Amino acid sequence: MAKDYIQSMLGENERIVLSTRQHWFVLFSAILAEITVTLLLVAAVSVAAIYFPLAAIGFVLLFLPLISMLRDILIWTNHEYLVTNRRVIQISGIFNKNVVDSSLEKVNDVKMTQSFFGRMFDYGDVEILTASEIGVNLFKRIGDPVKFKTAMLNAKEKMGFEGTAIHTQTDNIPAMIAELDELRKKGIVTEAEFQAKKAQLLAKM
């Protein structure tokens, strides 16, 4: 179902370049308390049941930490970071989805921060500075941040040579303008960007 939801958000000719999540340290730190409580409950109820058989009913209490653990696992599993050939997308939420995306065209700078342990266990923060209203998009403690940053920069570099191909083809300008217009209608290219690129293409005719 999650894959279907992601696919439904992709535009025509848009494809996923990289998909990742927060490092497993994030999940482990979230469920560590539940694991500890579960083990303590099992030990306490097991000892008590030796002397008081009815104490075995206490095992019912295990549902509380186990349900909480399941919730944390689902939250971690449903928090994804995607790099497509057009956008960087952050998706979170189990039932109610929260989606934040930044067009690669609007990405001005990328900052990656890794601590000593981050380099050792391969996690870190990636901060994306954009020209959109969001301004800054921070991805905290993601796994393999170097690969994420590289995939994003490579996708941004290739944008000028894919889709519209306005940098490599000049023999079919009307068709390219029509394709740009389709991108504008889908919200991938802004009105200002469309007019600017249209003017550039018309100047070559």
Image: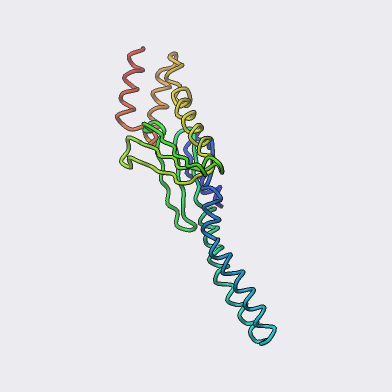
Seen from this angle, which residue lies furthest right? 50
129 or 36: nearer the viewer: 36
Q: Is residue 163 left or right of residue 47?
A: left
- Residue 7 visible within the image: no
Give the colouring mode of the picture: rainbow
50 or 79: nearer the viewer: 50
Above-or-below relation of 54 to 75 = below
- Picture residue at 37% right of the left edge, 35% below the top: 185
- Picture residue at 49% right of the left edge, 57% below the top: 94
Q: Quadrant of the C terminus?
A: top left
Where does residue 72 sit, x and y in percent of width and height?
A: 52, 60
Where does residue 75 sit, x and y in percent of width and height?
A: 50, 56
- Residue 90 visible within the image: yes
Q: How many numbered marks are there?
A: 0
Q: Is residue 189 left or right of residue 152?
A: left
Seen from this angle, which residue lies furthest front? 116
Where does residue 77 sit, x and y in percent of width and height?
A: 54, 53
- Picture residue at 56% right of the left edge, 52% below the top: 1
36 or 96: nearer the viewer: 36
Above-or-below relation of 86 to 26 = above
Where does residue 170 sit, x and y in percent of width and height?
A: 43, 14
